[in-house]
Structure formats: structure tokens, C-alpha cells
Amino acid sequence: MEDKIRNNLLLDFYGEMLTEKQREVIRIYFECDSSFSEIAEELGMTRQAVYDNVKVSKAQLDSFEKKLKCVERFLANREKLLQISTEIDALIETDKNQETIKKLQNIKKNIEKVVQNQ
């Protein structure tokens, strides 16, 4: 998985477990793709303090994921839902019963809503 996506998912799941300052620094670092110097200037910190903050925060986020596996489960569930959606498409193609097709299409719409809201 691309690091940027993984990092943003880690922040989404575990960001509230960081201190307010850590959250602020790591959010800017991940979401705005800012350099340490840019973040330091924006927040009135030294470049070294930003570097240390990012390093510690990333380690904490990785530690939370290693223990709790929320991102791993989220991605696995998303993949399963997408597979189910594909299987529903195949059933719709082969079934001739319009009532069954409508039910399958409704199920697929609900799955797509869940995947999009994740």
C-alpha cells in the first residue's frame, strides 16, 4: 500500500491518541506534504523539534496499528466488500428473474455506500 494512504489512515484511526501538538505536526506533515522547515516556520518550532515530533508520532502510530490492527482490518473488510460487489455483478448478469436482480442491485448499492463512507 502506498505510504501516503497508509499514513493518512493511521492518522484517521489513531490521531486522537496523540497529543494535540503531535497531531498538529503530523497532520501538516502527512496531509499538506510540508517539509520540516515549513512546519517549523508555521508553528514556531525548530526544524529539529519538528523532525523529532514526526519521528516519535510515526512510531506511536505504527505501534498502535501493530497492537490494534484497525487499518489492517479496515482494508481487509473493504476488499471483501468489493469482492462481494463483483460477485453480485456476476449474479445479475446470469439471473433472469427481475425481482432477484432488483434485490441484488439494492444490496450492491448498500455495499457501495459502506465502501464510500469508509
Image (spheres, rainbow, N blue to C red):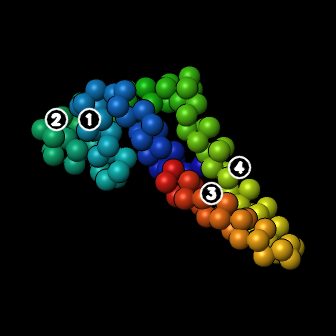
Question: Disc 4, disc 1: CB below 8 Å?
Answer: no
Labels 4, 3: front one: 3
Q: Kindly state the secondary structure of the residue where label 1 is placed.
A: helix
Q: Amino acid at mark 2?
A: Met
Question: Disc 4, disc 3: CB below 8 Å?
Answer: no
Labels 4, 1: front one: 4
Question: Disc 4, disc 2: CB below 8 Å?
Answer: no
Q: Which residue is mark 3?
A: 111
Assess disc 4: are there few (<14), some (14-19) or many (≥20) residues with their C-alpha within 10 Å of its C-alpha. few
Assess disc 3: are there few (<14), some (14-19) or many (≥20) residues with their C-alpha within 10 Å of its C-alpha. some
The disc, 4 or 2, on the residue closer to the chain's N-terminal end is 2
Q: Amino acid at mark 4?
A: Lys
Can residue 44 be seen by looking at this rendering? yes
Q: Residue at x 47, y 43 (%)?
A: 9
Q: Residue at x 34, y 28 (%)?
A: 18
Q: CA distance from mark 4 to mark 3?
A: 10 Å
Q: CA distance from mark 4 to mark 1?
A: 38 Å
Q: Which residue is mark 1?
A: 50
The disc, 4 or 1, on the residue closer to the chain's N-terminal end is 1
* Residue 10 image offset from top left, x and y in percent: 46, 38
